[in-house]
Image: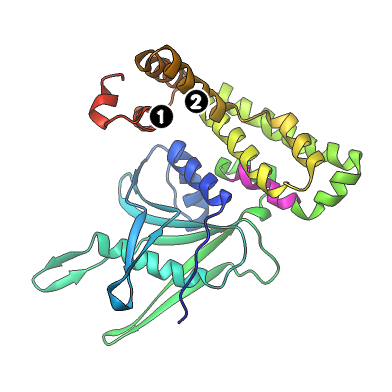
Amino acid sequence: MSEVKLTNTPYDDVFRTLLNDCSSLIIPVINEVFHERYSGKEKVVFSANEHFLNRQGGNEDERITDSNFKIVGTKIKKYHLECQSTIDNSILVRMFEYGTQIALDEGEIKENVLTVTFPHSAVLYLRCNESTPDKMKIKMVTPGGEVAYDIPLMKSQQYTIDEIFEKRLLFLIPFYIFSHEKRFEEYEKDGTKLKLLQGEYELIKSRLEELMDQGEISEYMKCTINDMSNKVLEHIAVKYDSVKKGVQSVMGGKILEYEAKTIRNEGMEEGMEKGINALVSTLKDMNVPIQTILEKVQEKFNLSLETAKKYI
């Protein structure tokens, strides 16, 4: 089998940012894909995303999964999701490689028996066509018998705005623009059609604000969803200025990213301590989880975990 070449995309980055900064949003996605019944209040616990795969000649290849986590509630289950922007037959090979490594990372040897638990795996497809299946299958033929398991595919383009909000699949909102991708040229040339697209985003924005007012999501989550929607738009509509500007005029600019950068820059000018306190205060006001605040303080100011904790 030929070696699989990987290319990271901005959409992978958006996927990981949403998962790390707004981890509770992934739970309704898990419910939808795997037919689970999580309440949404369970804890999402992340595992390492970096894995090293042994190759011939003793070389190691580093692979980074899009997500590797457990949901802890009345039971504990491992999950592995990949975000795929294009149809790629090599995804099955990667899913097997990732799944095997995730299983080995937490493998257990007792009385000469190695037990490995594979995660529940799925792929989020941002683009699909009529031939895109609903699931893939991995089959292993071993000396002890045959083992097979399904990998379901979630196709974001198939979800309407109503379905996204009814099922609380807010994680999909930044990728909603993919459902309009084939009509970008029409929108670019026809202002009336572009206004219809803007109308859909007005609806998305107002419904997000309703959820925030009802306390279902925080202002931080709303800002992150808006920010990530703009980040996807920047890349998918790079050749269509009217589409890009039209949607951005509704969703707003890159509020979250620039706000954090502004706070960081002010901290550099006026003193790191003041900057850190300003960042912590802002994030607390936005009801950001403490763990996320710690991570952002560490990242923005290059602090150890112990030092960051002093400011919380």
Seen at 85% across and 45% down, the residue is 187
Q: Nearer the viewer, residue 1 or 156?
A: 1
Q: Was residue 35 drawn as part of the magenta stretch in this picture?
A: no
Seen at 90% across and 39% down, the residue is 191
Residue type for callout 2:
Ala
Tags 1 and 2 in contact by the CB under 8 Å rule? yes
Q: How far across and down, in percent of the image, does residue 292 sit?
A: 38, 32
Name the image quarter holding residue 164: top right
Say above or below: 251 vs 264: below
Residue corresponding to mark 1: 300
Q: Is residue 25 left or right of residue 310?
A: right
Which numbered disc, 1 or 2, marks the residue that appears first in the sequence? 2
Q: How far across and down, in percent of the image, does residue 284 sit?
A: 42, 19
Q: Which residues are magenta?
A: 172-180
Say above or below: 189 vs 122: above
Q: How far across and down, in percent of the image, does residue 29 sit?
A: 51, 49
- Work out how far the residue at label 1 is from the one at label 2, CA to CA, in angstroms: 8 Å
Q: Is residue 66 left or right of residue 310?
A: right
Q: Is residue 224 left or right of residue 302?
A: right
Say above or below: 259 vs 226: above
Residue corresponding to mark 2: 260
Q: Nearer the viewer, residue 143 or 187?
A: 187
